[in-house]
Image (cartoon, rainbow, N blue to C red):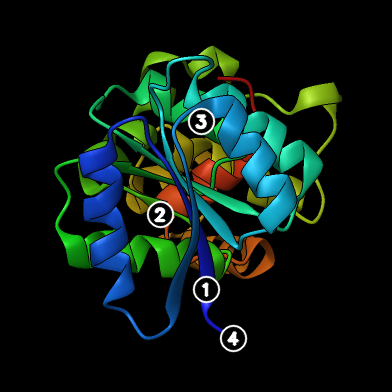
Amino acid sequence: MPIRVLIADDHALLREGLRQVLHLEPDIEVVGEARTGAEAVRQAARLRPDIVVMDINLPDMSGIEATREIRSASASTQVLVLTIHDQEEYLLEAIAAGASGFVLKDVEPRTLVEAVRLCCRGEGYVHPTLSARVLNLGTRRRERWTPLGGGIPEPLTRREFEVLQLVAEGVSNREIGQRLFISEKTVKNHITSIFRKLGVADRTQAVIHAIREGWVKV
């Protein structure tokens, strides 16, 4: 079955460009287009696409608000946010709304296609220029990286959550070991376990997962 895509953007030329790029892929099918946020929500409810490629700036409601409504109505529909903005605040808002990926509009066509596929596989995608900023958020907002409700989120152990907190602060494995009084090898083992339990492939995806699940405040 091909990946079914809905494109939401208020610029006809960009919609056409996106459709042409995705149409070239044998495993991707563009099933609809929307010009506004409200239309994107309606189309997503009617067509049930696998993923919506969503512009963040839409005339009637923001792409983030539309993302929130789409994800609330259908958890199986992923959203890949497309924007000209490279501030991490937009990324965090999109993740909090349920977006699976975040791509800048100047991205190469092959990267857009890769992002669509990754999001549909549940792996997520963040534009490389923003990845480091996500990992460094904890450095500027360290006091906010605390478990919501005071407990340790499943399925992590207390130690794994401590490691994840430090990963979120952009701390290296060696320094994590020094802070927690464990070996660097043990740190690596904990991180491998975190990745396995969360179903993610790297540090950025682990932090994004924690944000999306509401385990940490941002």
Which dot, 4 or 3, sits closer to the camera? 4
Residue placed under numbered mark 1 in the picture: 3
**In the image, is 170 to the left or to the right of 68?**
left
What residue type is disc 3 on? Ala
| Disc with the residue nearer the chain's start (3 vs 1) | 1
Measured Cα–Cα span from mark 1 to mark 4: 7 Å
Element on which disc 4 rests: loop
* Front one among 208 and 11: 11
Q: Is residue 50 left or right of residue 118?
A: right
In this rendering, would 44 be left or right of 13?
A: right
Q: Position of residue 76 (x, y in %)?
A: 72, 58
Q: How far apart are marks 3 and 2 (CA)?
A: 12 Å
Q: Give the amino acid at mark 1.
A: Ile
Amino acid carrying label 4: it is: Met
* Residue type, mark 2 in image: Tyr
Viewer-proximal residue among 164 and 68: 68
Marks 2 and 1 close (CB-CB < 8 Å) = no
- Give me the residue at 38% from left, 36% from top: 9
Residue 175, percent from left and from top: 36, 43
Among the two numbered marks 2 and 1 on one chain, the one whose residue lies closer to the N terminus: 1
Badge 3: residue crowd in 10 Å (few <14, some 14–19, many ≥20): many
